[in-house]
Image: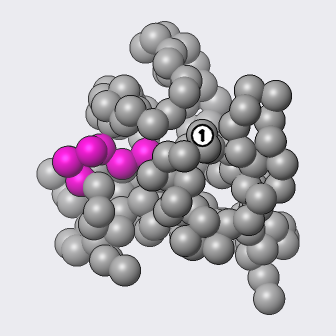
């Protein structure tokens, strides 16, 4: 598994929003499309809960992820297409899962579209079926503690 080199995981800041929106808009596999205002509203709520992490090389943010500490949901993992395949998404996902575990959660869950690269990555990382949403999306679950 590749590991991100010369990168930094850090909490997101409001000043990151334009780049996060750019990354979010560039990823083809997700099924949600929101305009800038709705994105900012959603991201602001997640940022207020200190739930968003970014991976940056110091010059630019290449990916971000968010987890909900109340529900143990991984709400987002997005890496810019030009930065994929470097382990950035895995590092972000691991950071979110570690945070959920520190909050006392024994499992995390997420929703993804079936037949996507994201689904394959999650399954390769040990995420297992937990149901199908009304939208047809797959709900996956992973045990965080042994």
Q: Which residue is mark 1?
A: 113
Q: Residue 81 location, x and y as percent?
A: 27, 45
Q: Residue 74 location, x and y as percent?
A: 66, 51
The structure residue drawn at horizontal position 45% and vertical position 52%, both measured from the top left corner, is 117
- Please identify the quarter of the rendering in which residue 7 is found: bottom left
- Please identify the quarter of the rendering in which residue 89 is found: bottom left
92 and 83: which one is in front? 83
Residue at the limit of the structure toward the bottom, as seen here: 146
On-image quarter of the C terminus:
bottom right
88 and 41: which one is in front? 88
Q: Is residue 108 left or right of residue 25?
A: right
Q: Is residue 58 visible?
A: yes
Residue stretch rendered in magenta on the structure: 78-83
On-image quarter of the N terminus:
bottom left
Q: Is residue 110 left or right of residue 63?
A: right
Q: Residue 8 location, x and y as percent?
A: 32, 65
Q: Is residue 50 visible?
A: no
The structure residue drawn at horizontal position 46% and vertical position 11%, both measured from the top left corner, is 35
Q: Bin the neighbour count of mark 1 within 10 Å (Cα to Cα): few under 14, some 14-19, many 20 and up.
A: some
Element on which disc 1 rests: loop
């Amino acid at each position: 598994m590749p590991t991100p080199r010369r990168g930094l995981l850090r909490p997101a800041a409001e000043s990151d929003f334009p780049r996060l929106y750019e990354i979010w808009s560039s990823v083809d596999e997700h099924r949600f499309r929101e305009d800038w205002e709705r994105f900012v509203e959603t991201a602001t709520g997640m940022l207020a809960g200190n739930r968003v992490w970014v991976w940056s090389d110091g010059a630019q943010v290449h990916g971000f992820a968010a987890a909900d500490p109340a529900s143990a949901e991984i709400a987002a993992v997005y890496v810019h297409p030009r930065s994929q395949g470097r382990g950035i998404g895995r590092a972000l996902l691991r950071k979110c899962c570690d945070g959920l575990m520190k909050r006392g959660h024994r499992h995390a869950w997420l929703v993804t579209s079936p037949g996507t690269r994201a689904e394959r990555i999650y399954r390769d990382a040990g995420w297992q079926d937990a149901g199908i949403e009304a939208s047809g999306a797959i709900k996956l679950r992973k045990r965080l503690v042994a």
